[in-house]
Image (tube, helix red, strand yellow):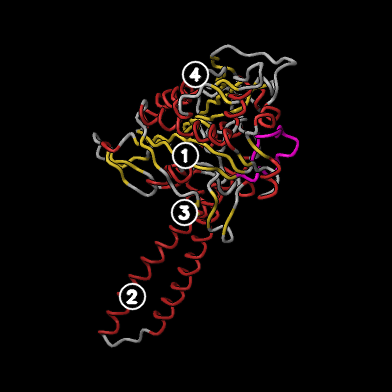
Amino acid sequence: MLDIRLLRDQPDDVKTRVQARGDDYPGIVDEVLTYDETRRRCETERQQLQQERNATSKEIGKRRKAGEDTSEIEANVRVIGESIKSLDEQVLQAETAQRDLLLSIPNLPHEVCPVGEDETANPEVRAWGERREPSDDLKDHVALGASLGLFDFEAGATVSGSGYVVFKGQGARLERALIQFLLDLQTEQHGYTEVSPPIVVRRDCMFGTGQLPKFEDDMYGLEDGAFFLAPTAEVPVTNLVRGQLLSEADLPCKYAAYTPCFRREAGSAGRESKGLIRMHQFDKVELVQIVQPDRSMAVLEELTAHAEKALQMLGLHYRVVELCTGDLGFSAAKTYDLEVWAPGHGGYLEVSSCSNFMDYQARRMNLRYKDGETKKNRFCHTLNGSGLALPRLYVALVETWQQPDGSILLPDPLRPYFGGATEIR
């Protein structure tokens, strides 16, 4: 959530920056400021009336002691009281409307973000590894899965409907091995603390990280929207410290978590969704960092490198793209996407978005720390990134490491999770 003081002090700058995201966000900024002006005016009037009522009440006391009639002045006090009650209602209405509108305004793109309308304007920052080119003898992951019995879409549809899959045999073991490898890498080499959070989260947690109110149609709600199946571990993990006042010694907080993730993918018709590429339920290892404001941009580079390391160890070609202003996620100020190459698919697949949210999420969840130097309470900066998302990683791995005889070569880091086996047959 944006700081209301920023909107008051720099409305034109806020509107210019938020306009780069598209939609009519500048109009919402104007609405917020209108309600803010109404609220502040009503609060001022209420304070003046309260002072008048207090002074009048003292006058009533004096007159009663003097034996004077106070009926007229008491009637005036009652009128003042009704006016205060009316102003209380107006303040509450303005506060509610202002907060609802503030929650619907996305984060401001960082000043260094490339400006553009959509993903076609996202610049490539770097690439790693050799790209295996598509060819007639390369199979896609659907064909490979069928020939090796790795997964079963029909079984998934029987149990849950379209957009679900059942991993089987060595396919299920590969899924588990990837999760274990990713967790071990981030906890053992990069210093993250592993957590295993609930996957059912409260509604206010979804507001805290910015999934609500904008994306409610994409989420699986429970009990009339009081709870949700987590769309990503970002939600429960970041909210572990919601409402807290941390000491500077507590920072950085570094968490890694595996969870299944649940998304309706509302409005995704017509987008690439073959096989495992777009699922309603999928597995993901998430990285979350909570840091001091002056460190967050450097930490974004660090966190992105941590996610990249997994792709490098698995020998997968990938590229890093920076999201332009029109393609940024709702809560993000700056984002890098990692896109891994899938030769059977013949294209890149996003397996991670690494984002700096600055103080946007922290304001929504009232997450602060006490500055060791100034002793003032300041909002933390939050960051997260997939480290990595399956099953697109799964797709790229089996397509990249398929062999002419139909087997799949296992990259070295995965072999210990297969009892030393070097391939899947």
Q: Quick check: 26 left or right of 346?
A: left
Q: CA distance from mark 4 to mark 2?
A: 76 Å
Q: Quick check: 18 left or right of 4?
A: right
Q: Residues within 10 Å of mark 2 (few under 14, many from 20)?
A: some
Say what amino acid the circle numbered 2 marks: Ser
Compared to residue 133, the image places residue 172 above or below, namely below
Q: Earlier in the sequence, mark 2 or mark 1?
A: 2
Q: Quadrant of residue 175?
A: top right
Secondary element at image label 3: helix
Q: Magenta region: which residues?
A: 263-279
| 132 and 306: which is toward the camera | 132
Provide the residue designation for mark 1. Answer: 258
Q: Look at the image and say whether residue 408 sits in the magenta stretch.
A: no
Say what amino acid the circle numbered 4 marks: Gln
Camera sees residue 35: no
Secondary element at image label 1: strand
Residue at 58% across / 26% down in the picture?
A: 424
Say what amino acid the circle numbered 3 marks: Arg
Query: Viewer-nearest of labels 2 and 3?
Result: 3
Q: Are marks 2 and 3 in contact (CB under 8 Å)?
A: no
Q: Residues within 10 Å of mark 4 (few under 14, many from 20)?
A: few
Provide the residue designation for mark 2. Answer: 57
Q: Quadrant of the C terminus?
A: top right
Secondary element at image label 4: helix
Q: Where is residue 349? Give x, y as percent.
A: 62, 26
Provide the residue designation for mark 4. Answer: 312
Residue at 70% across / 46% down in the picture?
A: 157
Say what amino acid the circle numbered 1 marks: Tyr
